[in-house]
Image (spheres, helix red, strand yellow):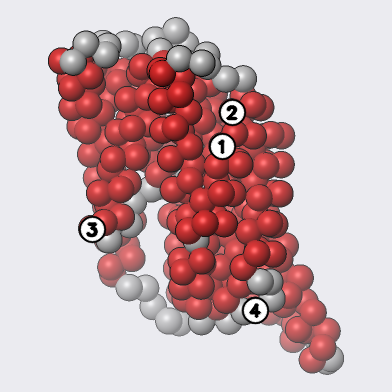
Amino acid sequence: MDVLALTAIAVAFYIAWNIGSNDSANAMGTAVGADILSFRQATLTIAIFVLMGAYLRGYKVMKTVGEGIVPHGFLTMNMAIIALLSAGIWVTIATVKGLPVSTTQSIVGGVIGVGLATHAPVNWWTLTKIASAWVISPILSGIFAIILYKFYAWVVSKMKSVSTIEALYKALAILGGSYMAFNFGTNEVANASGPLVGAGFMEPRVAGAFGAISLAIGSLTFSYAVMHTVGKKITSLGPISAFAAQFGSAIAVSMANFVGLPVSSSQSIVGGVVGVGLLAGRGVEKSVIRDILFGWVATPLTAIVISLVVFKVFAFVGLV
């Protein structure tokens, strides 16, 4: 295996590892924060369902990221490395600065950047659909979360046994987390491995398995603190509202998966939390809305700029 292939694998691993170390908290933070599952049990569950999602359903989003933005044949191995590296650079900078950004949007921006740098035809209609999904996904998450909250609140109100209610809470936390982890496999993993598929380096299922394992390693090695933080923040809404936010966002991401559009699970779950918060009369922090808008606009644009700069650097040293 040559240096170029090893570099591509290493950069894709870095992206998927980042997703696992940060976004996996959205899947199992509730269960861990409520002591329903231990950290190791949660990460094992994440690994299983992420692998299932990536292997069984990840190909649609991989195709969109790898071939739908820049046509097949234009995204070479060098270009895939530049796109992934550019996304990783921005996510790392944002993490150091404490800025909430989306890995999904960063990778899409990276792919657009290499397309513009090489004067490849960019499918702007596909990009319009992707951008629309970024806006619609959190809104749908909030709507679904409100519906689920009302339904399960009604179900719980009919129960008389405390033990039955507690068992329901535990089942909902595990079910919601597993569903969200499956969506990580179908959507988030596809973002990390999509450029490798588009460059013709890996088959979709092989790329999905590689990305899922990388994400699981990130979850196991570096997500402990984030998982507990997210768990406490989400469970402050209460067991039913936490589940509603989590499951509502998972449904919205599933809809995006069905049509093969890459979306941000983090922004979706924020949309779910906001929806339940409005229903419960807690109001919405303006900073949350500001953060989401920042992610929608600044992240892909910044990733495009970084991708163009990285391409120029690679060209200057003769790597492209």
- Which residue is identified by label 1? 211
Give me the C-alpha separation between circle 1 and circle 2: 6 Å
Q: Amino acid at mark 1?
A: Gly
Farthest-out residue, top: 73
Residue 217, percent across and down?
56, 49
Mark 4 or mark 3, earlier in chain: 4
Residue 310, percent across and down?
22, 26
Q: Amino acid at mark 2?
A: Ala
Considering only vertical position in the picture, is 98 above or below 207?
A: below
Residue 277 in view, yes or no: no
Q: Amino acid at mark 4?
A: Asp
Mark 2 or mark 3, earlier in chain: 3
**Which residue is rendered at x = 37% and y = 73% of the image?**
284
SS label for mark 2: helix
Q: Is residue 134 left or right of residue 309?
A: right
Residue 108, percent across and down?
38, 32
Q: Nearer the viewer, residue 8 or 284?
A: 8
Give me the C-alpha separation between circle 2 and circle 3: 31 Å
Residue 240 in view, yes or no: yes
Q: Is residue 10 left or right of residue 317?
A: right
SS label for mark 3: helix
